[in-house]
């Protein structure tokens, strides 16, 4: 895990922290600082007046949100970043980030704590992103370009192993790891509820990004919502938050 | 009475609904359960009784390991994810779910998954998760919809910074500090569990002491154990609001103008019956001021043919009581004779340490002018308690002074909820304290506490009355 992120995790989890301490640390990472300022000023966060300093942004967003953002920015910079395959990396990133935000909504509506759901959904494409990055590095090193189908097949093949490796190195909770890896087969996952949440969040994220590919009716009809016990009228209430989620994600 | 698709439809598959349907089916009637959750068992199985007890077991193990770690020169990590502590709970729930499903199937109870909404007193529209609908009819309906955490207007539960007894179980990590708002059973159970796990827990409530329905010795015993684990109880605290400070803490405002801050706030204001969205507005059903369904002694509501049981009708809101009520409601609804009634319902509080009572309390005895002898056994005198490493706690035997008949039992300490059943059997059989002296129990066992308490009763009975008064005065 990059230094700033590791220090942030340490600072936010293990000791009494103040906004000034966090702001000083974040200053050393331009990408994180920029993202924090953007989110703090976004309409979804409804700042009373424009936020002009990092310390103000940290105070406004709170420790949990800063930690989530730091994780997201770190992932984007370190993992969702495959030279030569930038559009695919960006697409995976947008899916992951939106899924994280949707997962929070799903968890809240089911009277579950939101943090594990957010983290598992945010991480659910890291295996694919890392595979993409490593394979693209291989192409650069060998000065070769694989055919698109073989490349895609390899990403699919390595996604679970790379995802598991990364999350175990980062010592994420076991349920988060299992859900982030096993979300496609949520019905047989040992953490089926969390994996189902990630699956549903993935569908909602895909719908938010590409409504023409996955329309509202298809999302509504997904059996994952039955597994989670979310009734059709509750799904509609959830989908009505689409613009709010999009605004929060900056997409 | 007109016939329908079923002879009895139970709304909800918790202990009340499930036992009612099985009882009806066993008696040869067509029974169905309508359940809105993906699994059967109600909140007892999915978000209440079972998961919280599993977490409690882990907290106990953690505490015991902490005790052993020093002697074994082992360092324990204090930052274990809560999910790791709940490891195995999903398997317990799945096993129970399978068992309950098999029981329903074996007895021919039809399980209909969906949200039931009353169209009238005898017709129920079931909205399925796939969006389809079906109308069921029956001359008899049982409301066994259970309960959910009660929320109050001043405290917004966001399931992130302010949690309730549903979302507390999916916290990713054990917080560093927690305020528990409330002083009832659920508040005390979670407060003691998180304190045992190393979280700095402060309970805030207007009551001077927690668990106000218990006798003073049990209350003070719990409080002493809670404080020994680092917990704090601030009685006389009126909480007027709780708000995330937008940074790292939740600020709790007290009525006296002061404010305090912690990582997480657990709002434990009791439970409220699940009666929303099921079409009760069409029925003019009698609802109490506390929001529970009003029933008579046969568990029938003011609307003929509609019965209610379990948490939906309010206290005691215990799983064991709900199961019994469900059975009785089914028998009453189907015109079958009820089994003999018993007022002996044990109550178990799964705090650390456990608390259990059955029969008469000292307060009830005083209000009924019953002269009591209280025999006490401290667990420090029980060999098995030392072997188990849990030598704190006590058992009190409450006996009628003249006859020594056992009228009540109170236990505080590990295994209390099991230990109380021996006393319950003695009360049910009309036994006296002498029963525990005459019988031979295994040794070493916790049941030895009954003998010790019975000898204490014997000592008081053979003591001159003047000395007894002195003793009673000293106990107060």
Image (cartoon, helix red, strand yellow):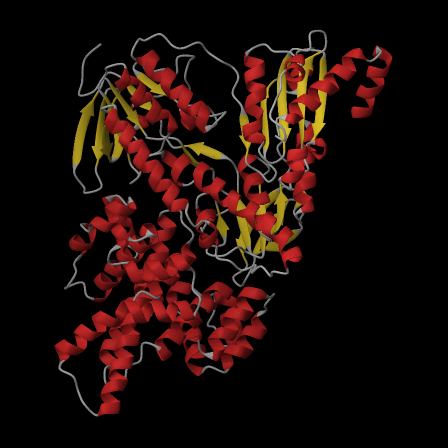
Horizontal arrangement in the rendering, residue B41 relative to residue B471 (left or right): left
Q: Quadrant of the N terminus of chain B?
A: top left
Q: Position of residue A90 (x, y in %)?
A: 27, 76
Residue sitting nearer the eye, A7 or A50: A7
Horizontal arrangement in the rendering, residue B398 relative to residue A132 (left or right): right
Q: Is residue B208 visible?
A: no
Residue at horizontal 28 percent and vertical 67 percent from the top: A160
Seen in the picture, residue B200 relative to A251 is either above or below; the reply is above
Seen in the picture, residue B326 relative to A99 is either above or below; the reply is above
Q: Position of residue A63 (x, y in %)?
A: 51, 65
Residue sitting nearer the eye, B378 or A32: B378
Residue at horizontal 26 percent and vertical 62 percent from the top: A205
Residue at horizontal 46 percent and vertical 47 percent from the top: B169
Seen in the picture, residue B81 relative to B27 is either above or below; the reply is below
Horizontal arrangement in the rendering, residue B463 relative to residue B380 (left or right): right
Q: Quadrant of the C terminus of chain B?
A: top right
Q: Position of residue B140 (x, y in %)?
A: 27, 17
Residue sitting nearer the eye, A242 or A202: A202
Classify residue B41 by image quadrant.
top left
Residue sitting nearer the eye, A5 or A21: A5
Horizontal arrangement in the rendering, residue B107 relative to residue A34 (left or right): left
Classify residue A209 by image quadrant.
bottom left
Residue at horizontal 59 percent and vertical 68 percent from the top: A17
Q: Spot the residue most to the bottom.
A: A143
Q: Is residue B28 visible?
A: yes
Q: Position of residue A142 (x, y in %)?
A: 23, 91
How many numbered discs? 0
């Amino acid at each position: 895990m990059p230094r700033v992120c590791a220090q942030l995790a340490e600072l936010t989890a293990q000791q009494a922290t103040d906004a000034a301490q966090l702001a000083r640390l974040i200053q050393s990472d331009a990408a994180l600082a920029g993202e924090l300022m953007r989110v703090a000023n976004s309409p979804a966060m409804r700042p009373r007046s424009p936020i002009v300093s990092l310390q103000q942004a940290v105070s406004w967003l709170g420790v949990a949100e800063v930690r989530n953002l730091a994780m997201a920015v770190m992932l984007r910079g370190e993992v969702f970043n495959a030279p030569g395959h930038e559009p695919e990396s960006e697409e995976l990133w947008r899916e992951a980030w939106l899924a994280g935000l949707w997962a929070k909504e799903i968890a809240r509506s089911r009277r579950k704590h939101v943090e594990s759901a957010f983290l598992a959904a945010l991480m659910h494409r890291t295996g694919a992103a890392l595979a993409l990055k490593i394979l693209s590095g291989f192409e650069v090193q060998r000065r070769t370009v694989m055919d698109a189908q073989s490349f895609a097949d390899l990403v699919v093949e390595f996604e679970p192993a790379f995802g598991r490796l990364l999350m175990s190195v980062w010592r994420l909770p076991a349920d988060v790891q299992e859900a982030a890896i096993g979300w496609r087969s949520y019905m047989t996952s040992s953490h089926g509820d969390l994996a189902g949440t990630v699956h549903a969040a993935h569908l909602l994220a895909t719908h938010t990004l590409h409504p023409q590919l996955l329309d509202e009716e298809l999302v509504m009809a997904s059996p994952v919502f039955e597994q989670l016990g979310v009734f059709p009228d509750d799904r509609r209430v959830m989908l009505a938050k689409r613009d709010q989620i999009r605004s929060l994600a900056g997409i | 009475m007109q016939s329908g698709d079923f002879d009895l439809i139970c709304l909800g598959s918790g202990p009340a609904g499930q036992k009612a349907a099985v009882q009806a089916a066993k008696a040869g009637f067509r029974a169905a359960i309508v359940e809105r959750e993906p699994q059967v068992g109600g909140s007892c199985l999915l978000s209440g009784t079972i998961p919280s007890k599993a977490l409690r077991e882990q907290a106990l193990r953690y505490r015991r390991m902490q005790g052993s770690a020093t002697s074994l020169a082992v360092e324990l990590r204090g930052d274990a994810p809560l999910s790791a502590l709940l490891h195995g709970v999903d398997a317990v729930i799945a096993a129970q779910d399978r068992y309950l499903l098999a029981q329903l199937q074996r007895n021919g109870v039809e399980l209909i998954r969906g949200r039931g909404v009353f169209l009238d007193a005898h017709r129920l529209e079931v909205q399925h998760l796939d969006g389809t609908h079906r109308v069921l009819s029956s001359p008899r309906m049982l409301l066994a919809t259970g309960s959910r955490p009660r929320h109050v207007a001043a405290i917004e539960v966001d399931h992130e910074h302010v949690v309730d007894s549903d979302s507390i179980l999916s916290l990713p990590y054990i917080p560093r500090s927690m305020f528990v708002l409330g002083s009832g059973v659920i508040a005390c159970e979670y407060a003691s569990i998180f304190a045992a796990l190393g979280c700095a827990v402060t309970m805030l409530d207007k009551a001077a002491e927690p668990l106000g329905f218990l006798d003073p010795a049990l209350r003070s015993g719990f409080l002493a154990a809670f404080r020994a684990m680092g917990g704090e109880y601030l009685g006389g605290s009126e909480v007027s609001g709780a708000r995330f400070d937008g940074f790292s803490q939740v600020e709790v405002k007290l009525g006296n103008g002061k404010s305090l801050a912690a990582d997480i706030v657990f709002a434990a204001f009791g439970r409220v019956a699940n009666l929303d969205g099921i079409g009760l507005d069409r029925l003019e059903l009698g609802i109490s001021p506390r929001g529970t369904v009003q029933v008579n002694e046969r568990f029938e509501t003011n609307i003929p043919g509609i019965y209610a049981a379990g948490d939906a009708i309010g206290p005691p809101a215990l799983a064991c009581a709900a199961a019994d009520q469900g059975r009785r409601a089914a028998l009453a609804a189907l015109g079958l004779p009820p089994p003999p009634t018993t007022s002996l319902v044990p109550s178990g509080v799964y705090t650390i340490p456990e608390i259990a009572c059955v029969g008469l309390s000292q307060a009830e005895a005083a209000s009924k002018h019953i002269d009591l002898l209280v025999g006490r056994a401290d667990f420090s005198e029980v060999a098995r308690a030392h072997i188990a490493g849990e030598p704190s706690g006590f058992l009190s035997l409450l006996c009628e002074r003249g006859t020594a008949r056992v009228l009540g039992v109170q236990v505080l300490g590990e295994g209390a909820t099991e230990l109380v059943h021996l006393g319950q059997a003695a009360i049910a059989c009309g036994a006296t304290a002498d029963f525990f002296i005459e019988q031979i129990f295994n040794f070493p066992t916790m049941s030895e506490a009954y003998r010790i308490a019975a000898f204490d009763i014997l000592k008081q009975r053979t003591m001159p009355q003047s000395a007894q008064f002195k003793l009673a005065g000293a106990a107060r």
